[in-house]
Amino acid sequence: MKRLFFLLLLLVPFFAESQIAQFGGPLRNGSYPDKNLLDKWPDAGPDLLLTVQGIGAGWSSAVTNDKAIFISGKKDTLDYLTSIDLTGKINWQVPFGRSFQKSFPDTRCTPTVEGNKVWVVSGTGKLSCFDATTGKEIWAVDVDKQFEAKWFNWGVSECVLLVDNKVICSPYGDKTALVAFDKNTGKLIWQTKSIGGKRAFINPTLMVYKNFRYILSQNTEKLIAVNPDNGEIAWEYRSKGDEIAPNTPLFKDNEIFLTRGYNTTSVMLQMAADGKSVTEKWKDTVLDCHHGGVVLVNGIIYGSNWISNSNGKWCSLDWNTGKIGYESEWPGLGNIKGSIITADNKLFCYEEKSGNVALVNPNPAKFDIISTFKINKGAGTYWSHMMINKGKLYIRHGDFLMVYNIKK
């Protein structure tokens, strides 16, 4: 018994270190593990716990390691990483690279946090690792310059992925597709071959199925599956449609759903038993999500589609068949799209024009809004994805971050 207790003590630091705070939640699929959340909100919205101003302009999300909150934002021509204590006071704020300098330059990179380290990528492709307590830079690599990345219209919009001892970045171009660095030192571990194409606006994610473990990543032309141990590409799938590719792939078991907006066809892929190829299972022309993401709840995909850059509808789509359950306006607001996350068998929707936030019942036949309130701080479009942690809803709008209590 004493030996067992001693072994458990040794394992505690390991498990604490392995907790990763990142864009889209633990699996990067917009699903959060929180339970016992409010079934209905007060008319004025959930209780506002914190309001933080001064984080800089941006559309990135907040993340937390339960010791501090981390978020990025643009000030002048630089991207800044901000640490906020749990009372809402800014601990420190440090620059981590030049912002993208052309249209839509505001920061998009949500920090990735593990243990006492934070990783971020600037709008021009500089990857940095910081001490989470002090804000001191530990290492940095100008990834896009070193690997001659090719950009699509709006520079870099990536939230890096941690896999084992590696941090994964995506400088697509003529030299490589993905690169892996030692997460502690910044030393290059591997780089893939080039598959052509340019950087899209999508985050790599880790797909685990049976004995297969693949990094899924998409550029302007293809989706690829990469072995995280050695950087070998297991298979490629050529995506058809607009080059932008703004949504992280959604997967379950050996199936992968791709949607890329702009009136392009969404597709469900099925990976072969040997893990060396994929085939198309079904296609859909309704739920072409712009950049607000999609989530899977009880076998149904939910999200908003693209009618134009400023208009869209909310949809449900059956995972197995591709059959549409509904395509709906936001009641009272019309054709207005936005971002979506899920927790506790609930949907949380954030429309991008005027900042209304909705608690929605995941009803496959109806866009079933239960409660709404409106964000009244900040400026610009409401493009940031929300985040939930320990019964708190984190919402960013421009230079402001708001934290709400949604626990019962």
Image (cartoon, rainbow, N blue to C red):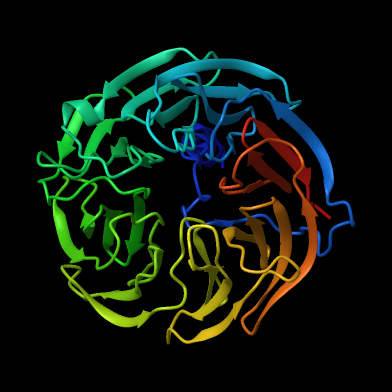
- Residue 199 location, x and y as percent? 26, 45
Closest to the observer, 11 or 341: 341
Give the percent coordinates (x, y) of residue 271.
25, 73
Question: x and y percent of residue 56 in the render?
Answer: 58, 26
In the image, 251 versus 33, the foreground residue is: 251
Q: Is residue 314 left or right of residue 39?
A: left
Decide if residue 392 is on the left or right side of residue 298: right
Q: In x, y percent, where is residue 44?
A: 88, 51
Q: Is residue 171 left or right of residue 320?
A: left
Q: What residue is at 50 percent from the left and 39 percent from the top? A: 15
Q: Quadrant of residue 137?
A: top left
Location of residue 220 with respect to 265 vertically, above or below: above
Of 322 and 84, nearer the camera is 322
Q: Residue furthest right?
A: 43
Residue 209, placed above or below residue 286: above
Name the residue rendered at 81%, 59% in the picture: 38
Decide if residue 18 is in sight here.
yes
Against 113, residue 215 (above or below) is: below
- Which residue: 73% across, 39% down? 403
From this view, report whether residue 74 is shown above or below residue 65. above
Q: Is residue 299 visible?
A: no
Quadrant housing the C terminus: bottom right
Which residue is at a point 64% across and 57% down the rendered structure image?
351
- Near-viewer residue (58 or 405): 58
